C-alpha cells in the first residue's frame, strides 16, 4: 500500500486498511523460503546504497528543520546521516540477511503416552507495529528484522525524521519487491498525526504486537493506552555492585565504562553500589568524578569524596541518561540485592567480584532481563550479544526479555502427529 495517500481523518479506518493489507502480505511471507527472504534483504540493502544521494538530501531537510526547531545536539546527532552511517545501515540489513532464520525451528519434541508425536515449532508473530522517534536507522533495522522472521511490519516514525524515513522506506521497498516480497509487508504510516498512533494502539485483533522505541514519554503512552500487546522497557535504571572481593582496577574500569562510554543509552549505569568492605571505593568514585561524572550519594558515599553531592530519595529511581550517577555504600551482598530489588527497573544489573559464590548468587537472585558478572552494563545490546540488529530491549516477564531480535519476533505452535488415535 502506498505511503503517498491522501490525509485521513478516520484513523481507525486507515489503520484497519493498512493492517489488513499487512496481514495478507504476512501470510505470503510465512510461506516464503528462507533464502528468498535473505535475497530480498540483500536487494533492499543494494537499493538503499543506490538511493544514497536521495536519502541524504531528504535527511538534510530533517536536520535543517530540527535545528530550526531547537532539537538538542544529542537528538540532532541521532538524526543526522552521512555516507558512512548510511552504509552502516545497509551493512546491518545484510547482517540480518545472513542470520539463521528461526521460522520452522523445532523447539522441543516428545511422544505422549497416547503415542501422539508432539512438536513445538517457531512461527512468526504476524503483523508488528513499530512506533519510534528520531533515529532513521530504526526504519531499516525494524523492517529487516521483521521480514527475516516472517513478520509484516507497520512503521510509524517520528516527525523529526519524516523525510529520512520515507526515503529509506521507499528504497527498501523497491529492493524487496524486486525479489517478490509483497509491497505491504513493510508499510510506513502515511501521516504524522498523533491520532493515528492512538488508532494503532486500539487495533486489537489487527496488529499482533506493538514495539515502542523512544523516550520515556512515548513508551509510557504506549503502555498506558495500548489494547494490543506491547514489548518494551520504560526505564533503564541499571546498577553496578562492587563486591568486597572485586579487583580494584577492574572495578574502576568497569564503573567508568558503564557510566561514561555513552551516557544516553538504556544500558548506561545509573546507580553504583559499593560494598562497605571494598578497600578501593574512593579510587572508583574519584575516577568517575575525574571523568566529569556528577555523583549523588548517601552519607557514607559522600564521606569518600567531598565532590559527591547529597542524593535525594528520587535519585535512586532516576534514569539520568547523562553524566550523572547515584552512589550508595551497602553492607554486603544481601544489602545490595535488597537495594536492586527495590530500585532496579529490571533492565541490566551487574556485579564485579572475584568471589564465585557471590557472583553466582547475584546471577540467580537478581530478577532483571540481563544480569552480568565482571562486565560493563554497556554490553546490553543485541549486536554485542551476537543477535544482529535489535528491535529493542524488553524488561517484562512474558514472551521475550533482554535484546529482542529474530527469535524474540517469533512465537510457536504445537504440531501433533497421530496414527489414528481417538480419546477414550
Image: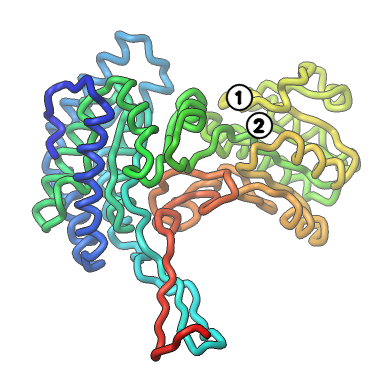
Q: Position of residue 183 (x, y in %)?
A: 14, 47
Along the line of sight, the residue nearer the viewer: 219 or 136: 219
Q: How many C-alpha atoms fall within 10 Å of the one at disc 2: few (<14), some, or many (≥20)?
A: many
Q: Which quadrant of the figure has residue 129?
A: top left
Q: How many marks?
A: 2
Report helix, strand or loop for mark 2.
strand
Residue 227: where, in percent of width, then height?
44, 36
Outermost residue toward the front in this view = 424
Residue at mark 1: 320
Q: Is residue 274 above or below residue 321?
A: below
Image coords of residue 300 (percent x, y): 88, 26
Residue 94 horizontal side relative to residue 40, left or right? right
As drawn, the label of residue 380 is none
User: Does residue 94 appear left or right of residue 113 in this picture?
Assistant: left
Q: Say if residue 116 shows up in the picture.
A: yes
Real-space Cα distance between discs 1 and 2? 7 Å
Among numbered discs 1 and 2, the one appearing first in the sequence: 2
Image position of 350 (left or right of 196): right
Q: Quadrant of the N terminus?
A: top left
Q: At x 11% / y 46%, what residue is drawn?
A: 174
Q: Which mark is residue 270?
A: 2
Left or right, residue 322 beside residue 56: right
Residue farthest to the left, as pictured:
178
At x 47% / y 72%, what residue is drawn? 107
Answer yes or no: do the residues labelled 1 and 2 have beta carbons within 8 Å? yes
Viewer-side residue, 38 vs 233: 233
Q: Quadrant of residue 94?
A: bottom left
What residue appears at the point 22 percent right and 31 percent down from the top-left corner? 14
Question: Is residue 141 at least partly visible in the picture?
Answer: no
Amino acid at each position: 500500500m502506498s505511503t503517498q495517500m491522501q490525509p485521513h481523518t478516520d484513523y481507525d479506518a486507515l489503520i484497519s486498511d493498512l493492517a489488513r493489507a499487512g496481514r495478507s502480505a504476512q501470510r505470503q511471507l510465512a510461506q516464503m523460503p528462507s533464502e528468498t527472504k535473505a535475497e530480498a534483504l540483500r536487494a533492499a540493502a543494494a537499493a538503499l546504497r543506490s538511493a544514497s544521494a536521495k536519502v541524504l538530501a531528504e535527511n538534510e531537510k530533517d536536520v535543517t528543520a530540527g535545528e530550526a526547531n531547537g532539537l538538542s545536539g544529542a537528538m540532532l546527532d541521532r538524526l543526522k546521516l552521512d555516507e558512512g552511517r548510511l552504509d552502516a545501515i545497509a551493512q546491518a540489513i545484510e547482517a540480518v540477511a545472513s542470520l539463521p532464520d528461526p521460522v520452522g525451528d523445532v523447539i522441543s519434541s516428545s511422544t505422549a503416552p497416547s503415542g501422539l508425536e508432539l512438536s513445538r515449532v517457531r512461527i512468526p508473530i504476524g503483523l508488528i507495529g513499530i512506533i519510534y522517534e528520531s533515529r532513521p536507522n530504526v526504519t531499516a533495522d525494524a523492517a529487516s528484522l521483521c521480514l527475516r522472521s516472517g513478520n509484516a511490519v507497520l512503521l510509524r516514525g517520528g516527525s523529526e525524521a519524516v523525510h529520512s524515513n520515507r526515503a529509506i522506506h521507499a528504497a527498501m521497498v523497491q529492493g524487496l519487491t524486486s525479489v517478490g516480497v509483497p509491497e505491504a509487508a513493510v508499510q510506513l504510516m502515511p501521516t504524522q498525526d498523533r491520532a493515528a498512533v492512538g488508532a494503532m494502539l486500539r487495533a486489537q485483533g489487527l496488529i499482533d504486537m506493538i514495539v515502542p522505541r523512544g523516550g520515556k514519554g512515548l513508551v509510557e503512552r504506549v503502555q498506558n493506552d495500548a489494547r494490543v500487546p506491547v514489548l518494551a522497557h520504560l526505564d533503564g535504571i541499571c546498577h553496578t555492585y562492587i563486591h568486597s572481593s572485586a579487583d580494584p582496577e577492574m572495578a574502576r574500569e568497569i564503573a567508568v565504562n558503564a557510566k561514561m562510554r555513552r551516557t544516553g543509552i538504556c544500558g548506561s549505569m545509573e546507580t553504583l553500589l559499593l560494598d562497605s568492605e571494598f578497600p578501593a571505593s574512593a579510587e572508583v568514585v574519584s575516577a568517575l568524578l575525574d571523568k566529569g561524572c556528577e555523583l549523588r550519594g548517601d552519607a557514607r558515599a559522600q564521606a569518600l569524596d567531598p565532590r559527591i553531592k547529597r542524593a535525594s530519595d528520587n535519585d535512586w529511581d532516576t534514569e539520568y541518561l547523562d553524566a550523572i550517577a547515584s552512589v550508595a555504600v551497602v553492607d554486603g551482598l544481601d544489602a545490595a540485592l535488597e537495594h536492586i530489588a527495590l530500585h532496579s527497573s529490571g533492565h541490566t544489573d551487574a556485579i564485579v567480584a572475584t568471589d564465585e559464590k557471590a557472583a553466582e548468587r547475584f546471577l540467580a537472585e537478581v530478577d532483571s532481563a540481563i544480569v552480568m558478572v565482571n562486565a560493563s552494563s554497556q554490553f546490553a545490546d543485541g549486536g554485542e550479544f551476537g543477535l544482529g540488529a535489535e528491535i529493542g530491549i524488553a524488561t517484562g516477564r512474558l514472551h521475550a526479555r533482554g535484546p529482542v531480535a529474530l527469535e524474540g519476533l517469533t512465537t510457536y505452535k504445537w504440531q501433533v502427529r497421530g496414527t489414528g488415535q481417538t480419546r477414550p
